[in-house]
């Protein structure tokens, strides 16, 4: 599948928009997490954790899934491909890791929002509140790394290095059928992750944890 130039520009614009939005939303989430952890104002801390839940479910999740899907479409439908360049593979890996981390932290986010109105909240769950701050900071580093890879595109082409070690005939056998098979396997894995996320969201939405 090859995207037309007009469609390719549309997908690229969409990918940049949602990816930058995802990064911005995580920065806001970190600010709320720090406020909830450090503020001596109980009402402010409570409001921060309630806002974190809304931000996670209705802003970060849609942007995260949109970034992943548009990134896949951009890679598959253009010259970059999924396995032609090292930076594409690494960026995809980072995006999938970020998606999984987000999924794993939906439950504690909703849990904190659910108990935020308790009288003893400010003296409880300190470890979980610190963990959300740390993981938010880690997510920002991960997203900044992915953005840097998109700009600098380091390391070159994968098959160019592979072909240096083998003859043209052997290289053709290695990089044609296996690469196609690996591409389908990776797409299937990402689709399974997305399906798992959707099932998780439908089965354990806001207020159900």
Image (spheres, rainbow, N blue to C red):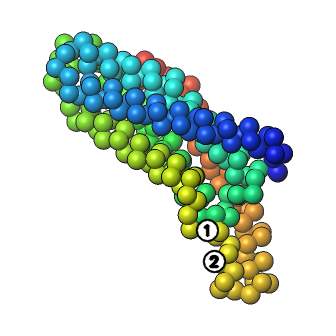
Q: Is residue 86 above or below residue 111?
A: below
Please, what secondary structure does the residue beneath circle 2 have?
Answer: helix
Q: Are marks 1 and 2 in contact (CB under 8 Å)?
A: yes
Please, what secondary structure does the residue beneath circle 1 have?
Answer: loop
Q: Residue 132 falls in which quadrant of the image? A: top left
Looking at this view, name the residue that lies furthest to the front: 152
User: Nearer the N terminus, badge 1 or badge 2?
Assistant: 1
Q: Residue 155 falls in which quadrant of the image? A: bottom right
- Going 61% across and 57% down the picture, which residue do you hit? 88
Q: Which quadrant of the rendered structure holds the C terminus?
A: top left
- Going 35% across and 33% down the picture, which residue do you hit? 30
Q: Is residue 44 left or right of residue 136?
A: left
- Going 47% across and 45% down the picture, which residue do you hit? 143
Instruction: Please say whether residue 132 is visible from this viewpoint.
Output: yes
Mark seen at residue 156: 1
- Disc 2: CA contacts within 10 A as few (<14), some (14-19) or many (>=20): few
Q: Nearer the viewer, residue 209 or 25?
A: 25
In x, y percent, where is residue 192?
A: 62, 44
Which mark lies nearer to you, 1 or 2?
1
Question: Gap in Å between the C-alphas at discs 1 and 2?
Answer: 8 Å
In x, y percent, where is residue 203?
A: 53, 26
Q: Nearer the viewer, residue 147 or 158?
A: 147
The residue tagged 2 is: 161
Mark seen at residue 86: none
In x, y percent, where is residue 187?
A: 68, 51
Q: Is residue 160 left or right of residue 8?
A: left
- Going 41% across and 42% down the picture, which residue do you hit? 140
Q: Is residue 137 above or below residue 110?
A: below
Q: Is residue 185 above or below residue 116?
A: below
């Amino acid at each position: 599948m090859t995207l037309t130039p007009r469609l390719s520009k549309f997908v690229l614009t969409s990918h940049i928009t949602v990816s930058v939005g995802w990064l911005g939303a995580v920065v806001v989430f970190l600010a709320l997490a720090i406020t909830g952890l450090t503020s001596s104002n109980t009402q402010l801390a409570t409001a921060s954790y309630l806002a974190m839940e809304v931000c996670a479910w209705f802003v970060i999740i849609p942007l995260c899934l949109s970034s992943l899907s548009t990134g896949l479409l951009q890679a598959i439908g253009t010259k970059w491909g999924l396995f032609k360049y090292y930076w594409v593979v690494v960026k995809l890996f980072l995006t999938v890791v970020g998606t999984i981390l987000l999924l794993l932290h939906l439950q504690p986010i909703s849990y904190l929002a659910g108990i935020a109105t308790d009288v003893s909240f400010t003296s409880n769950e300190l470890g979980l509140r610190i963990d959300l701050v740390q993981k938010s900071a880690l997510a920002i580093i991960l997203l900044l790394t992915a953005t840097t890879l998109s700009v600098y595109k380091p390391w070159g082409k994968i098959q160019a290095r592979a072909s240096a070690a083998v003859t043209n005939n052997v290289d053709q056998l290695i990089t044609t059928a296996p690469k196609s098979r690996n591409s389908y396997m990776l797409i299937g894995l990402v689709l399974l992750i997305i399906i798992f996320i959707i099932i998780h969201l439908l089965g354990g939405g806001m207020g159900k944890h």
